[in-house]
Amino acid sequence: MMTEDWAASPPLARRRWTVYPAMDLRRGRVVRLMQGDPNRETQYENDPLRVARRWRDAGASWLHVVNLDGAFGSSAADNLAALARVLGWAPAAGTHVQFGGGLRDMASVRRVLDLGVSRAVIGTAAVEDPALVEAALAAFGLERIAVGIDARDGRVRTHGWQQGAEITALELAHRWADSGVRWLIFTDVARDGMSTGLNLDATVNLARETGLNVIASGGVASLEDVSHTYRAGLSGVIIGRALYEGQIALADALQIGDV
């Protein structure tokens, strides 16, 4: 059997590793999209707070929440109301929230951080408005701002993955590593929501080449995928559909980091 490139190289230096259950919000509901396609939606729950509590009860210390409507440029009022409900409970429960989707100006970044989000993820603006990321880093600190890089065939996608950008994921990651960013979420769009396995080679290469804390996302299908992110020395993994459809038990995934 052919060895994956990431496994053939020495692991990255051991970093803090975290499992992030994903909660993708659309019109206030918890859903998943296949490859980011708004026409290929599966709804899992009407009440995001109930889902947040479920993942906390299973042991999660972080949640990864995405405002899909904001990413698509649509009204995000329902999703922000749902986020506020989750944040009204999460800190007291010892749960951190990483939040992204549609954060394209300073006011929106400040709004979610003031609500209680622990880390804001900036995606499209990291390509189109670098000054916003720089201002957010200066205002809120390196631990509270992450850059989200979404790519298909190595090239960056923006605006909820609906538009292409003339830059590769690695080029964009290098640009932000040189500017002081510490946290990066990398998603292979072609795999997201498909349960076909992570693109570990590309993800590990980004971390190795830039030195950033890279969180893997897109296509997690098994505990083996989760274990690979830990063994490779990445900083975390986001799990969505595999949790909601029972392919992975969150408690089992969390135990991987305890060995």
Image (cartoon, rainbow, N blue to C red):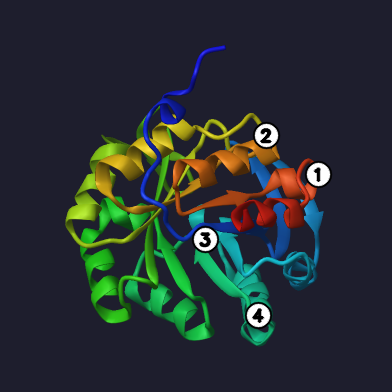
Instruction: For marks 2 and 1, give the CA distance.
Output: 10 Å
Q: Earlier in the sequence, mark 3 or mark 1?
A: 3
Q: Earlier in the sequence, mark 3 or mark 4?
A: 3
Which residue position is annotated with label 3? 70
How many residues crowd mark 2 within 10 Å: few (<14), some (14–19), many (20+)? some
How many residues crowd mark 3 within 10 Å: few (<14), some (14–19), many (20+)? many
Q: Position of residue 204 (x, y in %)?
A: 40, 38
Question: In the orientation shown, which residue stands out farthest toward the left?
Answer: 178
How many residues crowd mark 1 within 10 Å: few (<14), some (14–19), many (20+)? few
Q: Is 166 situated above or below 182?
A: above
Instruction: For marks 4 and 2, give the CA distance.
Output: 28 Å
Q: Earlier in the sequence, mark 4 or mark 2?
A: 4
Residue 39, image quadrant: top right
Q: Amino acid at mark 1?
A: Glu
Instruction: For marks 3 and 4, give the CA distance.
Output: 22 Å
Tag 1 and tag 4, C-beta contact below 8 Å: no
Q: Position of residue 194 (x, y in %)?
A: 65, 33
Q: Earlier in the sequence, mark 1 or mark 4?
A: 4
Q: Amino acid at mark 4?
A: Ala
Tag 3 and tag 1, C-beta contact below 8 Å: no
Looking at the rendered structure, which numbered label has been put on residue 176? none
Q: Earlier in the sequence, mark 3 or mark 2?
A: 3
Which residue position is annotated with label 4? 90
